[in-house]
Image (cartoon, helix red, strand yellow):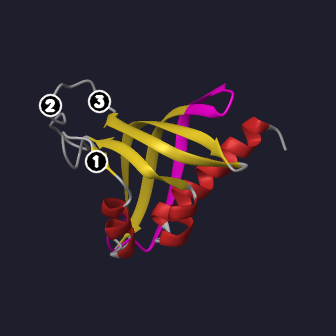
Amino acid sequence: MTPEAEIWEALHTHLRSVFERDPDTYRATTTEDLSLYEWFISPHRQDGLSFHLFMIEHGAMLGNAASYRYDLLTPRLQVYADAAIVTYTLMLSVVAEGTVSHRTHNESRVLVREDGSWRVVHVHKSPAWQAPLSAPEGPGL
């Protein structure tokens, strides 16, 4: 398998672990010193695994969703030796109570190769709309 294919596989395994409430796989695909910026949670950097493990273990990532799918729109991969940067717009589609809803935001994830495995070390999320502080208002938004 090519390094690029390994990175994409590691990323998808990591993302599924979040949405499928799998803390063991999340730990296996993420470094202990993880850092993240999630604009919709806090304007400050979060460090370590404990916050996301709490969210995963309590099902907070998808709420009461019956099913989900995610798509990576305009994905890009940059590889530099044992480091990789993956950027894309994440579109998450969720079915809850018979209704499908969609959420999007831009993501950058940095992965490093440690002991033969690619693991996420940093995540940065930003709104997928052109606005400094808040979402646009109106129907369907």
The amino acid on which the numbered mark 1 sits, given as a three-letter code, is Gln
Residue occupying the point 69% across, 50% down: 115
Q: Is residue 50 magenta?
A: no
- The numbered mark, 1 or 2, whose residue comes first in the sequence reads 1
Give the number of the disc on residue 12.
none
Q: CA distance from mark 3 to mark 2?
A: 10 Å
- State whether residue 48 is above or below residue 42: below
In magenta, the rendered stretch is 60-85
CA gap between label 1 and label 3 equals 23 Å
Task: Classify mark 1: residues with Cα within 10 Å, few (<14), some (14-19) or many (20+).
Answer: some
When asked about the image quadrant of residue 75, the answer is: top right
For the point 73% across and 49% down, the residue is: 116
Q: Which residue is mark 2?
A: 133
Q: Who is closer to the viewer here, 114 or 27?
A: 114
Residue 139 image offset from top left, x and y in percent:
20, 42
- Residue 33 is situated, as x and y percent measured from the top left of the image, at 42, 49
- Circle 1: element type: strand
Q: Nearer the viewer, residue 26 or 114?
A: 114
Task: Where is residue 35? Give x, y as percent.
Answer: 37, 44
72 in magenta? yes
Residue highlighted by disc 3: 129
